[in-house]
Image (cartoon, rainbow, N blue to C red):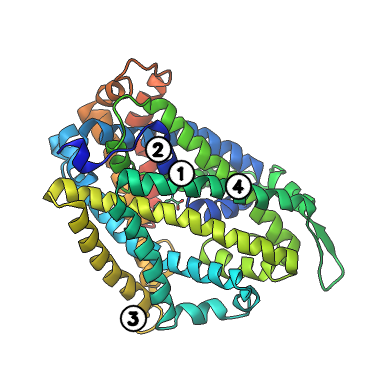
Amino acid sequence: MNEEKRGTFSNSLGFIIAAAGSAVGLGNIWRFPYLAQKNGGSLFLIVYVIFALTFGFTLLITEIAVGRKTKQGPLTAYQFISPKFKFLGLISFIVPALILPYYNVIGGWIIKYAFEFVIGRGASVAGDGYFQSFISGYMQPIIFCLIFSVSTFGIIYAGVKNGIEKLSKILMPLLVLLILILCCHIFFIRHTDETGIARTGLQGIAKYLKPDFTDMTFSRFCRMCIDAIGQLFFSLSVAMGIMISYGSYMKDDADLNKSTVTIEIFDTLIAFMAAFMIIPIVYVYSSTDGVQSGPGLMFIYLPKCFASNIAAYIIGTIFFVMVLFAAQTSAISICEAIICSEIDAFGWSRKKSTLVTFGVSLIASVCICFGYNILYFEMPLPNGSKAQLLDLFDYVSNSILMPLLACLICVMVGWFAKPKSIIEEIQRNGESFGRKGLYIATVKYVAPLLLLIIFLQGIGLF
Ligand code: PHE
């Protein structure tokens, strides 16, 4: 299929901003701060960076290279790398198809909270039980999800250059500006609680950045490494088909190595900044000491902090707008992974693919919204948690299919197609690739092993 019909990014910058927009998402905001605090502050940051430069880099550059080399969507790309691994296409299609419906539901929740804060009703969402009653309502979660989905699919419909790239070029700089404001304000906050204890933002920063070696046994260190790998893997948007589709829209003369490093640095910096602002906010305004993760942090704990005073309220408003930008660009990317597969595998037009996917994903999203009322259930998962419908979608995609897919991609490249096939693509225009040796060792041995551990942990065997 020709470039005109598939679409391309206009240049490396367009690709980098769109891919960074995909990488920066809810994972950076609602999971990274929790993991950083749980695992000894800056100690975790160091471990995270080391894995990002080795393991994360390998997974990310492999997927982008597979996309650019084959110029195919995830569903059909693998067969051109190694025919035996054609089946990976199906997994790469199922993963985003499972994630998109629930990401749109969460996107709807974010719009709702951003809206309430912007119109001055943020204090009410901080009330006890508000979140639970909101998500178990019949109409509102569906309406807000619909608004978020229409905006996602509208951009997809507009195309790669005119939709995804243009929007990312607007939203990403704004996101950086907002997160910088949020981080800077931490230096100035101070709050005295009911018991008369005053806490400052600077103390909160110290709490985040002070390395914590208490009880740093070997097993705790291993757990910290597993947390870092699991987080990285989700945060870089690999094993979701996204980077293959974005890579397939990349121009042949772009430097793959440099682009990958830039995306990684950007994603990691935003994660660090998210923790830099969230850990102190929770420390200063909340009597609970530890940062939570997931929806609980974003929709229950943080709104309570933001309701503390008027300055915190303004910060809360900026925060939810920032999160909305982060979630929107990620949702667009996961949607594009599906659309790109359909266009290449079934020969559909972008218009047809967008409309069909919109319809199907909306039905699935509505079912997920009903998962908190008429379809409510509680299912114990092998990893010990209890799941509702949304958690089940999340568990199957994130804990089972994604580690499995990433592991098999490494096996395919490391042992069947051989690393040379990817390295050739990375050096296509004669670029230097200094980390060649590291890449080969990681893709053949280190990454499959680490991913196997993450997979076994996901299914409760480790
Ligand atoms: N990197 C994204 C995040 O941190 C992962 C993601 C991308 C999830 C797209 C869903 C959709 O949230």
Q: Which residue is mark 4?
A: 177
Q: Give the residue type at disc 1.
A: Lys
Q: Which residue is mark 2?
A: 14
Q: Residues within 10 Å of mark 2 (few under 14, many from 20)?
A: many
Distance from mark 2 CB to nearest ligand 1 atom below 8 Å? no
Q: Are marks 1 and 4 in contact (CB under 8 Å)?
A: no
Residue 270 in the image, given as x and y percentages of width and height? 56, 45
In three-dimensional space, the C-alpha distance between marks 2 and 4, rounded to whole angstroms, equals 19 Å
Q: Give the residue type at disc 2.
A: Gly
Distance from mark 3 CB to nearest ligand 1 atom below 8 Å? no
Q: Is residue 93 left or right of residue 145?
A: left
- Which structural element holds mark 3? loop
Q: Residue at x 35, y 24 (%)?
A: 440
Residue 169, labelled with which disc?
A: 1
Residue 375, labelled with which disc?
A: 3
Q: Residue at x 27, y 64 (%)?
A: 358
